Amino acid sequence: MANPERFLLAGVMGWPVMHSRSPKLHNYWFEKYGLAGSYVPLAVKPEGLRTALRALPSLCFSGCNLTIPHKQAAMAIVDENDLIARKIGAISCVVVRPDGSLLGSNNDCYGFIHNIVQEFPDWRADTGPAVVIGAGGGARAVVYALAERGAREIRLINRTFAHAQRIVEEFGGPITVVPWQERHISLAGAAMLVNATSQGMVGNPPLDLNLAKLPQNALVADIIYIPRETALLAAARAHGNRTISGLGMLLHQGRPAWKAWFGVEPEVTPELHALLAATIPQSWQA
Ligand SMILES: NC(=O)c1ccc[n+]([C@@H]2O[C@H](COP(=O)([O-])OP(=O)(O)OC[C@H]3O[C@@H](n4cnc5c(N)ncnc54)[C@H](OP(=O)(O)O)[C@@H]3O)[C@@H](O)[C@H]2O)c1
């Protein structure tokens, strides 16, 4: 399948960027699908973002992913942002179109949902209330995705109430903001709990959440992927809940990017999951 005319290129722009697992993911797919190409970490400082993005077409890049701190700033640089990106207010992916213009998109919603559906094919968003903790970029993607999949009640909880309130005002729909101090009791009757804060990520303390009121049949998701099992997921597992980590979300969000860049929709297989997981500390205690 190698294309003799062209070496395929994409990358991830961030500052810092060398921690990113994306090159391992995308280069695995180049190998697997027999395409001549490479995906590289692009260490781009904020002041260089415009020049770097605008250079993509001349350098024959098909596009790039964006990570901290570029996800919002890039929206004002690209030529167009798709509807989901505009709703979420951040882009995670840039596609170079045939005319050299740049399209911004956000594949975090896709990644969040497809990770769950692959792991738990019987999961549905409308089986009961979902509790989402957090109101940053990741949480916005999660809330948008759940609402799109038909969730009928989303209880949104965030340390800073106003940030959650802003999401309700922008998104509308089945979202209710619950005050931070009521987070423990808000778990009563929930069918799903999602941590979309940075609490529990390596270097941060665990999310302060008592699971006593959470029904045992609720699915607990953490969008954090370093470590592989956060303290929240370990506690949920001990409580009897099904759990899912954020690594699969990261892997799945790469699929629509590949489809747009290279015309191939790659698979997330157990082998790929294990390959990436092996590069990440297993436990929050590690
Ligand atoms: N798996 C994936 O593909 C994927 C995709 C996106 C993000 N993520 C992960 O999700 C996490 C959040 O990312 P993000 O981009 O949404 O970050 P962000 O926009 O900076 O939002 C951070 C969130 O964490 C909350 N928070 C921060 N410190 C807190 C504390 N001490 N106590 C309680 N809440 C606190 C913030 O609340 P305030 O509003 O009060 O500040 C906010 O809701 C990161 O670990 C990131 O790596 C994973």
Image (cartoon, grey):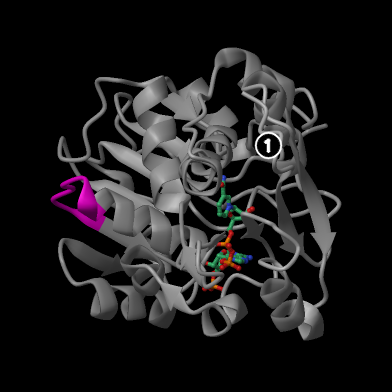
Number of residues whose C-alpha sits closer than 10 Å to that of mark 1, classed few (under 14), some (14–19) or many (20 or more): many
Q: From the image, which quarter does the C terminus lie in?
A: top right
Q: Nearer the viewer, residue 240 or 103?
A: 103
Question: What residue would you read off at disc 1?
Answer: 26
Quarter of the image with the N terminus in it: top right
What residue is drawn where x is 66% and y is 20%? 32
Q: Quadrant of residue 248?
A: top right
The percent coordinates of residue 141 (x first, y second) are 41, 58
Q: How many marks?
A: 1
Tell me: residue 37, above or below residue 205.
above
Q: Relative to the observer, which residue lies in front, 227 or 50?
A: 50
Q: Answer left or right for 223 relative to 213.
A: right
Percent position of residue 71, x then y: 59, 70
Q: Position of residue 174 (x, y in %)?
A: 16, 61
Residue 66 falls in which quadrant of the image? bottom right
Q: Position of residue 105 (x, y in %)?
A: 46, 62
Dominant secondary structure of the residues highlighted in magenta in the image: loop
Specify the quarter for ligand 1. Answer: bottom right
Which amino acid lies under the numbered mark 1 shown in the image of this protein?
His
Residue stretch in magenta = 147-154
